[in-house]
Amino acid sequence: RDFFVLKDAQGRVYQARPEVSSAAVRPGVNADVGHETAIPANGLTTSVYLVFDVAPDATDLMLFARNKPDQGFLVIGAVR
């Protein structure tokens, strides 16, 4: 749950919502697994459905690993 986080330009940090991810994922349609599902150790690329609840005024959302805040990538410039 705490591995991936989003940080916005205002410095706010948002944790993922695994329970929402599990409810929303449709395996083989919008992702392979939900956030609460173990990723299979089969050597294949696996997509994981991640959900974050962010402020409506959030901008420049960056996805990164909590322990590597200097390494991440821009996900979206603005929520609205």
Image: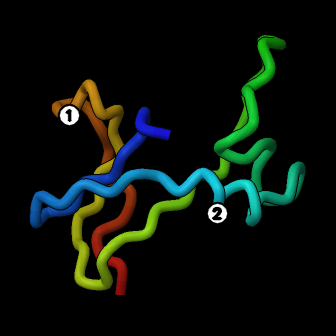
Instruction: Please tell me whether mark 2 sits on a helix, a strand or a loop.
Output: helix
Separation of residues labelled 2 and 1 (CA atoms): 24 Å
In the picture, measured across the screen, residue 77 lies left or right of residue 25, that is: left
Say how the picture is coloured: rainbow
Q: Going 50% across and 40% down the picture, which residue do you hit? A: 1
Q: Residues within 10 Å of mark 2 (few under 14, many from 20)?
A: some
Q: Is residue 20 above or below residue 67?
A: below
Instruction: Give the residue furthest to the left.
Output: 10
Q: Which residue is mark 1?
A: 69
Q: Position of residue 19 (x, y in %)?
A: 65, 56
Amino acid at circle 1: Pro
Q: Which mark is residue 13?
A: none
Q: Position of residue 25 (x, y in %)?
A: 77, 58
Instruction: Give the residue furthest to the right.
Output: 28
Q: Is residue 71 above or below residue 20?
A: above
Amino acid at circle 2: Val
Instruction: Please tell me whether mark 1 sits on a helix, a strand or a loop.
Output: loop
Circles 2 and 1 in contact, beta carbons < 8 Å: no
Q: Looking at the rendering, in which quadrant would you find the C terminus? A: bottom left
In the picture, measured across the screen, residue 57 lies left or right of residue 41, that is: left
In the picture, measured across the screen, residue 57 lies left or right of residue 63, that is: left
Total marks drawn? 2
Q: Which residue is mark 2?
A: 20
Q: Position of residue 13 (x, y in %)?
A: 24, 54
Q: Going 29% across and 60% down the picture, which residue do you hit? A: 61
Q: Going 42% across and 37% down the picture, which residue do you hit? A: 2
Q: Position of residue 67 (x, y in %)?
A: 27, 25
Q: Is residue 29 above or below residue 72?
A: below
